[in-house]
Image (tube, helix red, strand yellow):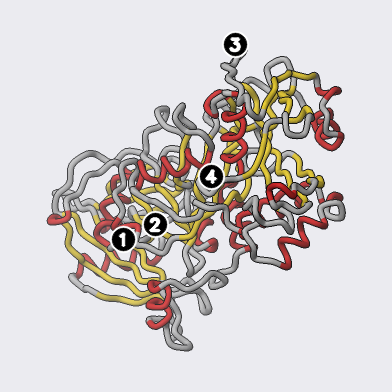
């Protein structure tokens, strides 16, 4: 898709966040971005236009240069963007392939520069009266890559434009600004798999998160909420191709515009740091209607919800940073968002948190309780029934999911019945909560510790001899269920 003005501006802003001292020397580029909405990626925009270069470093630390016949200069491969280019980095890789024959799959973005240019250079282009081109400027965004293999990369020169290639040591790089940055660049470690993820928000300021399968030792971050995405595969020319392929494969999602946002430095199971390129997009659909092929579910969350989720700190920080710079409602309203506005709560209405609870009673009358972890944010070292918050799902689906995730219990929908509702608050001024207690008439499996960071023990208790350290509203609900009462309240002022 065409490279939008906003996408180019976002990329330049990300670069200046790293190199704020270059703002003055990039003034011509910023001026064009500020005062015109012309297609700055088009070669026919003679107020100045963007070009894209590929800085390729081989395993010996040498930098690829090409002799450009039109100018007679030895420069890094690069050139004009085309309408078919899906990203600025993709334009650089296309030019690399066209000029030298080196395919995009033979190089990998340099860690930390997956979405941000390594260097931006402005240079004057002479007029060409024969082509009807006045003098203008090129705003050259240069992306940094490394050659993946020590073997000789295939070379097939674009003979009408390129007279030859040369691998130069860093101290002989022709561009002074580029040479200065390369000399300061720390040596690259062994190439790791390149990864990319999508940070997707809607017009209400919510973020789409993916609950991963609970397969410890088999997948990364089992049972945690994460962003959709994955590792680069050989057919992916760029990391934007990677994230688009992953969105399609994992959820059947095809987003319009994806904008480079930054890099998440996550830790894998071995404790190594893994850079993940983050692309931001906007979508206003219902995740329940998506075709999910991996993981448990997709759901919307606000940044204020994140503290109660099992989610990596680096992912939470990304969401909060994006939310701070992209407040809800700043994007054009979609039809779905306008419907939500019309359904907005009247002034003074307070949203209640919905909690789902499992009342699991064996044939001998004993009831299942779990001892919460000492570091738990809610009721540490206290007994409680198996419970969880409703997400973008109905209550029974939530109950079935929580039973499977927390204790390995399998419950069928037809075996679930509502046995009590308790409307409670902890203290005056707290957000009200509606606790739904469901009985499972039948189930399969024995309780096991699937989330030991939340629950340290499962045990069946006699309702007439419940433990002293029991969540107060849970004790009340069990008593009411034993008495056949469907509704109760607690914590409210008299």
Q: Earlier in the sequence, mark 3 or mark 4?
A: 4
Q: Which mark is residue 151?
A: 3
Give how far apart the Cα atoms at labels 1 and 2 are: 8 Å
Classed neighbour count for the residue bearing mark 1: other residues with Cα under 10 Å, few (<14), some (14–19), many (≥20): some
Classed neighbour count for the residue bearing mark 2: other residues with Cα under 10 Å, few (<14), some (14–19), many (≥20): some
Q: Nearer the viewer, mark 1 or mark 4?
A: 4
Q: What residue is pinned by disc 4?
A: 85
Q: What residue is pinned by disc 1?
A: 393
Q: Earlier in the sequence, mark 2 or mark 4?
A: 4
Q: Residue at x 28, y 71 (%)?
A: 421
Q: What residue is pinned by disc 2?
A: 299
Give residue 203's position: percent from left, percent from top.
48, 68
Q: Earlier in the sequence, mark 2 or mark 3?
A: 3
Instruction: Name the one closer to the observer, 81 or 320.
Output: 81
Are the two marked residues, 1 and 2, in contact with CB atoms closer than 8 angstroms? yes
> Residue 378, can we see it?
no
Among the 4 quarters of the image, the one containing residue 289: bottom left
């Amino acid at each position: 898709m065409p490279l939008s003005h906003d996408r180019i501006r976002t990329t330049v802003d990300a670069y200046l966040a790293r190199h704020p001292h270059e703002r003055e020397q990039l003034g011509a580029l910023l001026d064009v971005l500020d005062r015109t909405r012309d297609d700055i990626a088009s070669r026919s925009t003679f107020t100045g236009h963007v070009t894209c270069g590929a800085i390729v470093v081989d395993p010996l630390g040498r930098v690829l240069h090409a002799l450009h016949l039109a100018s007679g200069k030895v420069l890094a491969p690069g050139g004009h963007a085309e309408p078919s280019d899906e990203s600025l980095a993709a334009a650089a890789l296309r030019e690399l392939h066209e000029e030298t024959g080196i395919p995009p799959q033979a190089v990998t973005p340099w860690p930390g520069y997956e979405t941000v240019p390594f260097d931006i250079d402005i240079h004057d282009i002479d007029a060409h009266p024969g082509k009807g081109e006045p003098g203008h400027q090129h705003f050259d965004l240069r992306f940094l890559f490394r050659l993946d293999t020590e073997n000789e990369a295939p070379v097939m020169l674009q003979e009408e434009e390129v007279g030859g290639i040369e691998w130069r040591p860093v101290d002989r790089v022709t561009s002074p600004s580029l040479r200065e940055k390369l000399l300061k660049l720390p040596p690259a470690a062994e190439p790791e798999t390149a990864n990319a993820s999508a940070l997707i928000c809607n017009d209400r300021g919510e973020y789409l998160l993916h609950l991963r399968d609970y397969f410890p030792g088999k997948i990364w971050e089992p049972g945690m909420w994460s962003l959709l995405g994955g590792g680069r595969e050989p057919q992916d020319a760029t990391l934007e191709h990677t994230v688009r392929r992953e969105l399609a494969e994992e959820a059947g999602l095809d987003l319009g515009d994806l904008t480079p946002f930054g890099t998440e430095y996550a830790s894998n199971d071995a404790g190594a740091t893994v850079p993940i390129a983050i692309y931001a997009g906007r979508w206003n659909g219902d995740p329940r209607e998506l075709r999910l092929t991996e993981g448990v579910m997709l759901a919307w969350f606000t940044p204020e919800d994140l503290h109660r989720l099992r989610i990596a700190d680096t992912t939470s920080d990304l969401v909060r940073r994006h939310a701070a710079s992209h407040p809800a409602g700043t994007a054009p309203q979609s039809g779905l968002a306008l419907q939500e506005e019309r359904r907005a709560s009247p002034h003074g209405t307070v949203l209640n948190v919905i909690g789902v609870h499992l009342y699991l009673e064996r044939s001998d009358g004993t009831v299942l309780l779990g001892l919460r972890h000492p570091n738990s944010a809610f009721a540490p070292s206290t007994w409680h029934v198996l419970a969880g918050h409703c997400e973008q799902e109905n209550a029974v689906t939530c109950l079935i999911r929580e039973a499977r995730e927390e204790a390995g219990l399998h419950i069928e929908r037809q075996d679930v019945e509502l046995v009590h509702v308790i409307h409670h608050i902890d203290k005056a001024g707290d957000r009200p909560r509606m606790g739904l207690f469901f009985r499972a008439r039948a189930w399969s499996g024995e309780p096991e510790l699937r989330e030991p960071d939340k629950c340290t023990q499962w045990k069946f208790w006699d309702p007439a001899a419940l433990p002293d350290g029991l969540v107060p509203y849970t004790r009340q609900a069990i008593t009411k269920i034993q008495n056949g009462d469907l509704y109760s309240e607690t914590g409210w002022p008299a």
